[in-house]
Image (cartoon, rainbow, N blue to C red):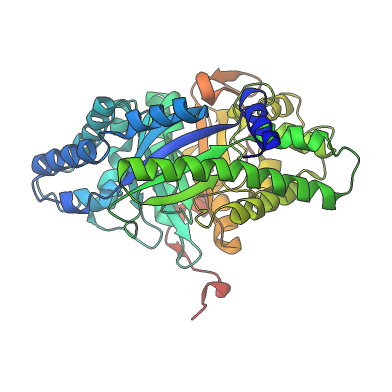
Amino acid sequence: METKQIRDTIAMIDEQHLDIRTITMGISLLDCIDSDSHKACEKIYDKITRCAENLVPVAEELENEYGVPIVNKRITVTPISLIAAAATDTDSYVEYAVTMERAAASLGVDLIGGFSALVQKGYQSGDRKLIASIPDALMATSRVCSSVNVGSTKTGINMDAVAEVGEMVKALADKSPLKCMNFVAFANAVEDNPFMAGGFHGVGEADCVINVGISGPGVVKRALEKVRGKSFDIVSETIKKTAFKVTRIGQLIGTQASERLNVPFGIVDLSLAPTPAPGDSVAEILEEIGLESVGAPGTTAGLAMLNDAVKKGGIMACEHVGGLSGAFIPVSEDAGMIKAAENGNLNIEKLEAMTAVCSVGLDMIAVPGKTTASTISAILADEAAIGVINNKTTAIRVIPVPGKDVGEEIDFGGLFGRAPIMRVNQSSPAAFVGRGGHIPAPIHSFKN
């Protein structure tokens, strides 16, 4: 590397919050299926601990060797609803979640994802059991993450599942709103997502792979500070070049991890994932582009350009870019988003518009505890519709907080930050959600 490139990389790490947000090992559990749930769980524990035995030591070795912080070491597994469906001796899948937790704890990984169900077109025998088990499963674990995919561009939206997820989220929040951080509902979920809570190992993936999630909102903001007042053409080019540099670091770490663990390298997910730390904010990037506050008119256009430029830069740098790769807008995890929400400059309706052009959806949003299950379901339906019509991933991680109302806040701690309780439209969507059935796939889904 040239001297200037080395200096730039050191500055990105030391001053601008560049990090490898996660090294995630994806593990297939298809060979762990058994009609006896206890035997299946034994196989699952053995498979996870065998495949990921060296994940944490190798990640720490790379962190020390290259000087790049690796914040999280994670695992994703095949959606458990597919693995557990063969078990004829139980109606609860909590034991599977506890097994995942035991394996993750023994390995020292931070999170394990895949307590999931894919119900975009309908239910198989294990799906309803898994969704019903989510509240108890998450209460019994600390590292397990869960997700449900309720729609896709190819299949439309399963409104029965949308209604069921709303009821489940309310039940989980009544037990502990903090546990809602570990659940997300998707449309068009991707099979190689290294980020949580939505990561799972898709059935089309290899038996075991390494995926890397890299983040650097602070790096992008610092680069844009040098082109203040310049045209959008220059702004976009600057973001693209910065994303290129960041992705190359992710590819280096991912390739080295793959070689040392002797498993295939999957993808680099270049997602601008903010943290509550000052200078590590997607909102501050948008404000650097020229907005007085995120949420102002122009926010959606700025975010669309940012997201597109990040993807272009990432694809230039690495032939295996995947996951979500773009900008995340989790309210509680972004200091600028928190400030804008508290000042009344950012509301759920504006966030919903922003999700049409960014990488995910309504993420880490706290709402009043009195918010009904049907309202949560309808918010999910709206987000799923944006994803299905635009052929992109959307999701919700909406957290009803019992006993709290607009103007109050909840503190999630650590990288999850804190969230002001946001206002929700009080008009009832109960009759809409109650119809059930299936919203058909859009006409442009027919490509054959």
Q: Quadrant of residue 423?
A: top right
Q: Is residue 194 visible?
A: no
Residue placed at 70% from the left, 49% from the top? 240
Q: Please state if 413 lies on the left or on the right of 118 as rendered.
A: right
Residue placed at 31% from the left, 56% from the top? 206
- State whether residue 384 is above or below residue 259: below
Residue placed at 16% from the left, 38% from the top? 46
Residue placed at 63% from the left, 28% from the top? 10
- Observer-nearest residue: 275 or 367? 275
- State whether residue 76 is above or below residue 431: above
Q: Is residue 358 visible?
A: yes
Q: Quadrant of residue 44?
A: top left
**Quadrant the N terminus occupies:** top right
Q: Residue extending furthest front?
A: 2
- Observer-nearest residue: 74 or 287? 74
Q: Position of residue 195 (x, y in %)?
A: 46, 40
- Observer-nearest residue: 375 or 64? 64
Q: Position of residue 57 (x, y in %)?
A: 33, 28
* Count of numbered labels shown in the rendering: 0
Q: Residue extending furthest bottom?
A: 448
Q: Position of residue 373 (x, y in %)?
A: 47, 39
